[in-house]
Amino acid sequence: MLQKHAIKKLLIVDDDVILQNFLLRSLASTGYMADCLTDGGLLPSILQTKRIDLIILDVELPNRDGYYWLKWLQHYHPQIPVIMASVRGNEHERLAGLEIGARDYLLKPFQFKELLIRIENILGSSLQSKNDSRFVPMGCWQFDTHTGTLMQEERKVKLTAVEASILKLLYINEGSAVSRDEIMEQTRGSNYNPLDRSIDIHINKLRKKIEADPSAPVCIYTVRGKGYRLQLSNLSEELIANS
């Protein structure tokens, strides 16, 4: 029999409404509080206003898939453990989720008792997430996501909170363009204002810190009509201008 626990708050991110309702009822009957989302795009807003102890994250979601949002969570909320759930049962899919940072990977369809045991095992552990993403390798540099500092031996480049948040998002999407609206939405959450164009100012300030020539950027490109793209391979020791 599963041992009793303090009330924990769970978040289910799955576009299967029938499964959502089943899990809400079942979790409530075992003493958990739970909320549901049908799209990972709502994560930035809800995590800004609510404390969540564990997330059950489906792989197949509308718009961006669960792997993207797992990466996002690892950079912005690494303290929240994630259980991935998917009908994709092959080893490659499972290992991909675990390598990104999922604490567990559950194959659909699953028995509720199995999910409950996995939740209990994770929340009952005193260990932090085994994939603490505080230090992120960026070329020959290490990015300390807690302090917003790029480090290479004795050299350090300090970023503001906004600059660090933008760099993390560009890193998650490395090689792909991220629109200004996506940057605002995923870094500001419910504080996102579609009319706010200050993102360009922050990008320019970030470029001055990591580009050898901010007027001709080779790390953070402007993609006309689409937004900004990070080319991580161009972030080398020589390109840090303001260390």
Image (spheres, grey):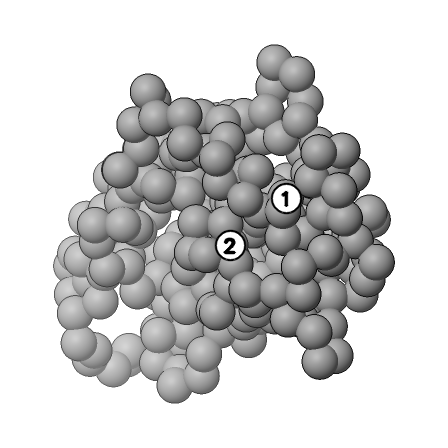
Question: Which residue is situated farthest in the bottom direction here?
Answer: 126
Whether residue 228 appears in this view of the structure is: yes
Compute the Cα span from label 1 to label 2: 12 Å
The residue labelled by disc 1 is 207
When the figure is inspected, residue 105 is found, relative to residue 132, above or below; the finding is above
When the figure is inspected, residue 154 is found, relative to residue 240, above or below; the finding is below
| Rendered residue at 27%/45% (across/down) | 46
Secondary element type, mark 2 = helix
123 or 193: nearer the eye?
193
Report whether 4 appears left or right of 200.
left
Position in image of residue 110 (x %, y %):
46, 52
The residue labelled by disc 2 is 164
Q: Quadrant of the C terminus?
A: bottom right
Residue 23 - label: none
79 or 57: nearer the eye?
79
Report whether 67 appears left or right of 30.
right
Amino acid residing under circle 1: Arg
91 or 161: nearer the eye?
161
| Rendered residue at 56%/51% (across/down) | 168
Amino acid residing under circle 2: Ala
Q: Quadrant of residue 230?
A: top right
Secondary element type, mark 1 = helix
186 or 90: nearer the eye?
186
